[in-house]
Each structure stands twice: as structure tokens, then as C-alpha cells.
Image (spheres, grey):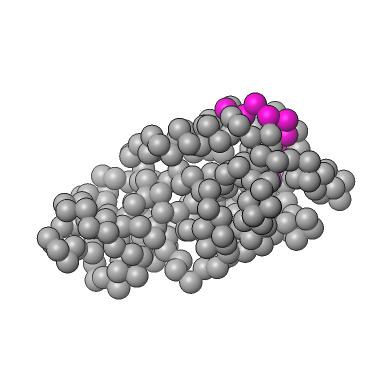
């Protein structure tokens, strides 16, 4: 409880919070994380997850890519949980500078957050690789096999960053600027094991560096406050 009180004190005393979110933020909405006990990496698969979700696999094994992607990566019925809602309330009360997320599930936006930097894209956006026509998530889910463009027949790609693809430069720059201007950085639900996203924490020059994650991370030693608990339980106490 002492740590929760400390977190409440930090939040109440902050005016420029940056909330850096990973997959653990959305587990309370029924979306599995990647590296947790029941996460996607723990599931047995003939092809490693890093391969299935790679650019090369998407191009060369498109049908197989979409078979996995539709069944394991898309959760259109998921709703924001208490974490997303609380973070959105901070923005409404002018305490939040930005949300920086590694998630592609659009739940921060569904909860009402507007200042969201998407490091890995958004599964709700999709586009034709040939003509650029845009498609929503329902079109992807309803398509048989690999979805094709109505206009030109080109292959449709999710607007998400796959393994082997570079992060969007504008997103990286926006994340760096936000973190550099923050008085409090809260890293939540991420193991900080994916680069270059994990290195963004080194842009922080503010007062309070907080890590909220079930498991330990490499950055725990430099954080001002670390709480290794389920995020839903933490936010229920705020």
C-alpha cells in the first residue's frame, strides 16, 4: 500500500505525465500479451512468432500470415479497461502530455485519449500496397484468405510494424519529444525488451520515473518507483 500511496502522490503532483504502454495494459481487456505466462510467445507453433509476424513472411507466406493474424492479433470486440480509462481521464484533466503505446489495439483511443503516439501502428488501419486505398478492420476480418483491394486487386497490408520493418520516424520523434518534456514518465505493462522502443526511456529528464509491470525489467534499477503487480489491481487502487 505504501507504493500505491507513493504512486498517487506522484500522479497528483504531476502536470506533464507521459504514459508508455505495452501489451500488459490490454490484458485486462482480454487481449493476451506477448511474453507473459499465457502470452503469444508461450503458445506452441511450428513457425516462431517472430517469423510469422515478420515482413518477409507477410510477403512470401501471405495466406499463412493472415490466418495467424486474424485469429491471434485482432480483437475488435475488446473494450478499454480501467487502465485505459484512467489514463484518458488524466488527459481530460490536463495532467497528461501524451500516451506512447506499443499496442496496435486502438484501446487508448476508444477510452478517449487523443494524444496517442503509436510506435507499432494500429490494426484498425489497413491499406492497399498498390494504390493506397484504406480499409477498416472489419474488411480484414471478413475477407477470405489474404484481403485484396476492391479498386485495383492489390494486396492489403495492416498499418502495423512487422518484424524486420523500421518504426515510423515521425512516431519516434514525437515520442522522444514528449518524454523529454515530461515531468513524470510511467512505463506500464511492458518488459522493455523490444528495441528501439525500450531505449526511449533515456530521453526522460523529469522528476519521477515509474515502472508498473508484473515482472522485473532492466530499467527497474534506475526507476524512482517500481510496482510489480497486475495493472488492473494497481489502477483499481488509484
Using the image as rendered, state which of residue 145 and residue 40 is in the foreground. 145
Which span of residues is magenta-colored? 203-212
Counting from the top left corner in percent of width and height, residue 5 is at 85, 47
Using the image as rendered, state which of residue 94 and residue 101 is in the foreground. 94
In the image: residue 51, left or right of residue 215: left
In the image: residue 6, left or right of residue 117: right
Question: Is residue 39 something one can see in this rendering?
Answer: no
Task: Indicate yes or no whether the magenta region holds residue 208.
Answer: yes
Q: Residue at x 53, y 53 (%)?
A: 114
**What is the number of callouts on the image?**
0
Task: Indicate yes or no whether the magenta region holds residue 206.
Answer: yes
Counting from the top left corner in percent of width and height, residue 19 is at 61, 45
Question: Is residue 69 something one can see in this rendering?
Answer: yes
230 is higher (above) or lower (below) than 181: below
Q: Quadrant of the C terminus?
A: bottom right
Using the image as rendered, state which of residue 1 and residue 96 is in the foreground. 96
Q: Residue at x 41, y 54 (%)?
A: 122
Q: Residue at x 14, y 63 (%)?
A: 151
In the image: residue 58, left or right of residue 96: left
Q: Residue at x 26, y 70 (%)?
A: 143
Counting from the top left corner in percent of width and height, residue 128 is at 22, 56
Using the image as rendered, state which of residue 99 and residue 158 is in the foreground. 99
142 is higher (above) or lower (below) than 98: below
70 is higher (above) or lower (below) than 201: below
In the image: residue 187, left or right of residue 160: right
Counting from the top left corner in percent of width and height, residue 44 is at 44, 57
Amino acid at each position: 500500500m505504501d507504493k500505491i500511496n507513493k504512486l498517487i502522490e506522484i500522479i497528483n503532483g504531476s502536470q506533464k505525465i507521459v504514459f508508455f504502454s505495452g501489451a500488459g495494459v490490454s490484458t485486462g481487456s482480454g487481449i493476451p500479451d506477448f511474453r507473459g505466462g499465457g502470452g503469444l510467445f508461450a503458445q506452441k507453433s511450428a513457425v516462431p512468432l517472430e517469423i510469422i509476424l515478420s515482413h518477409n513472411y507477410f510477403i512470401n507466406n501471405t495466406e499463412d500470415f493472415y490466418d495467424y493474424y486474424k485469429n491471434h492479433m485482432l480483437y475488435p470486440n475488446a473494450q478499454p479497461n480501467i487502465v485505459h480509462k484512467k489514463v484518458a481521464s488524466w488527459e481530460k484533466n490536463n495532467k497528461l502530455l501524451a500516451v506512447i503505446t506499443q499496442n496496435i489495439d486502438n484501446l487508448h483511443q476508444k477510452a478517449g485519449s487523443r494524444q496517442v503516439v503509436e510506435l507499432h501502428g494500429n490494426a484498425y488501419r489497413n491499406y492497399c500496397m498498390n494504390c493506397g486505398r484504406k480499409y477498416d478492420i472489419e474488411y480484414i476480418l471478413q475477407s477470405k484468405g489474404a484481403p485484396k483491394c476492391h479498386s485495383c486487386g492489390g494486396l492489403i497490408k495492416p498499418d502495423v510494424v512487422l518484424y524486420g520493418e523500421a518504426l515510423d520516424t515521425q512516431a519516434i520523434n514525437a515520442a522522444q519529444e514528449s518524454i523529454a518534456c515530461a515531468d513524470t514518465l510511467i512505463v506500464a505493462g511492458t518488459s522493455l525488451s523490444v528495441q528501439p522502443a525500450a531505449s526511449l526511456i533515456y530521453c526522460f529528464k523529469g522528476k519521477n520515473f515509474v515502472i508498473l509491470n508484473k515482472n522485473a525489467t532492466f530499467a527497474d534499477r534506475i526507476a524512482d518507483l517500481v510496482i510489480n503487480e497486475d495493472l488492473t489491481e494497481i489502477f483499481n487502487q488509484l
